[in-house]
Image (tube, grey):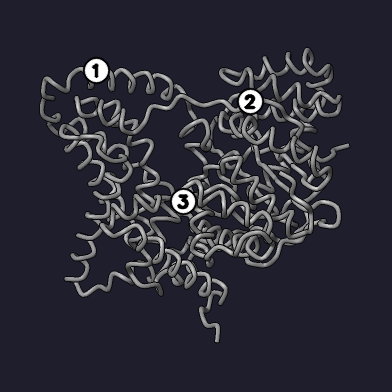
Amino acid sequence: MTTPHPEREALMAWLDGEGAEAERDVVAQHVGACAACADVVQEMHRASAALGDWPVDAPPATLAERMRQVTHGAPKPAPVPRWRSARWRWGALAALVLIGILVPLRMQCVEASSVCHINGLRHLFGPAPGSERAGATTPASSRSSGQDVRDRVPSRGESTPVAGPRAVTAVVVTVFVDWQCPSCKALHAAYGPLFEQYAHDEPGRVQVIYKDFPLNSACNPNLSVGGHEAACEAAVAVRLAREKGREREMVDWLFANQEGLTPEAVKAAVTSVAGVTDFEERYADELEHVRADVAEGTELHVHFTPACYLNGVLTNDQNGRWLPADQLRQLIDAELMKTGAAVRR
Amino acid sequence: MDGLRVAAFVGSPRRATVVTDEDLMLACRGGSAEAFEAIFERYRAPLWGYFRRRLVDSARAEDLTQETFAAIWRGSSGYEPRALFRTYLYTIAFNLLSAERRRLRTRATDPLTDLAGPASSAEAEHVLWLRQALSRLEESDREIVMLREFEQLSYTEIAALLDIPLNTVRSRLFRARAALRELLLAGPSGDRS
């Protein structure tokens, strides 16, 4: 121990991303070296996660119509003074450019580093019909990963320790993804180098499991209509590419060609990029595996992508935004510390 | 065989080009309904959640959500980006909520029952438990912890919104979370002793 324990308020502020950078650095270094403080931070994180398990229903559909009446029925704001007009023109131009980008998207992608969810997601903020609480003991296959994430991922709010194969693997990061989701692409760019670093520094200690949660009604019953046009095909393509040892190439291609991706383009690419020649024949069977992942996500109340769990605790905030990579690293380091691993970063 | 998908991705972080709320509001100032609609899309769900978690009556939650956006639209001609738009938005929402609570008080309805009141039939048991735990906090502490946990406001934003010192936000938030943690650990009954 090189520094005294920070006050608990300071730990809380650090976890919230608050405080001066110098203070934050001191706390970060301490937490990285002190298992007791790491435990306190984890407990605080769990309490916040418990509150995050208070979803609300989706905004009423009538709200948008009522707002249209306001903007089209009410008098326009007073004319802008002349001295403001140049700034307004630039602002309007910027807004129109944004709207031109946003409007064609069916997805509500708040921003690329944030979250994707579907307008028509039926149980957007609630348990799936007939499902029990997340963490249900009903066994179900998890053919994509070989592990049932529900064995490790309790409902947020449960304060019970999360079981895991700690003897070998100290940290399991589970990410529900849609390969056609821009936010997943951003997460991949941000977290990829971090995961590679752990693979190099702590081989086998940090496992990353990607679960499919395509935002398309053809393979995800949470959506009532449409969604990302090629999301189901992309999920199957990555699975088949994995068998060929070409997963990385396939994922890179999907992300590089994400905008305007079509099922036909995916089918062509899975052959040219990954050497898969039996996509059509195997599609139906593989899609069942995708659906098994979706079912797991549904039981966990996943309603956006990417949804990132760290040893069973959802790390996205209440608005679905995923953590910056440096904060995820601090949480992973805290988990590693608890199992006695030396954190060398 | 399906194995673990251990990430071995490479790539450099990419920064998305995002038009800020303040940019959109400057466009609104000139009367751009399209920019306002973009603002509405961004904040429709968060603002609805703000009112919905604090009011039992979903119809009033919808009314106040609409009133907040209407106030933004009406006031957009005089908008100046002195602070984050988000703070401006939640200040309006907070004022409307305060007025609503005053109105409820005159009807002899304890505003605390907003949180402790009956949940809808569709609401899960654990949500009811959270509502009850929050209802046991002091009102000022509860507002701070809710603004932080649900609206994700920074300490500075909360201080500006509630017009209290930054250190007060921090100390009250810590106190509220500690109390809340105890209540949540005690289980749904709330009786720990």
**Residue A72 disc label:** none
Q: Is residue A58 above or below residue B135?
A: above
At label 1, counting other C-alpha atoms closer than 10 Å, the crowd grade (few under 14, some 14-19, many 20 or more) is: some
Amino acid residing under circle 1: Arg
Read off the chain for label 2: B
Amino acid residing under circle 2: Ser
Q: Are marks 3 and 1 in contact (CB under 8 Å)?
A: no
Question: Quadrant of the rendered structure where residue A184 is?
Answer: top right
Callout 3: SS: loop
Question: Quadrant of the rendered structure where residue A280 is?
Answer: top right
Front disc: 2 or 1: 2
Front disc: 3 or 1: 3
State whether residue A299 appears in this view: yes
Please name the residue that numbered disc 1 is placed on: A89
At label 3, counting other C-alpha atoms closer than 10 Å, the crowd grade (few under 14, some 14-19, many 20 or more) is: some
Please name the residue that numbered disc 3 is placed on: A18
Looking at the image, the residue that sits furthest to the front is A2
Question: Quadrant of the rendered structure where residue B118 is?
Answer: bottom left
Callout 1: SS: helix
Front disc: 3 or 2: 3
- The CA span between labels 3 and 2 is 26 Å
Task: Pinpoint residue A85: horizontal percent, then vertical percent.
Answer: 17, 19
Please name the residue that numbered disc 2 is placed on: B12
Read off the chain for label 1: A
Task: Pinpoint residue B19: horizontal percent, then vertical percent.
Answer: 38, 27
State whether residue A108 appears in this view: no
- The CA span between labels 3 and 1 is 36 Å
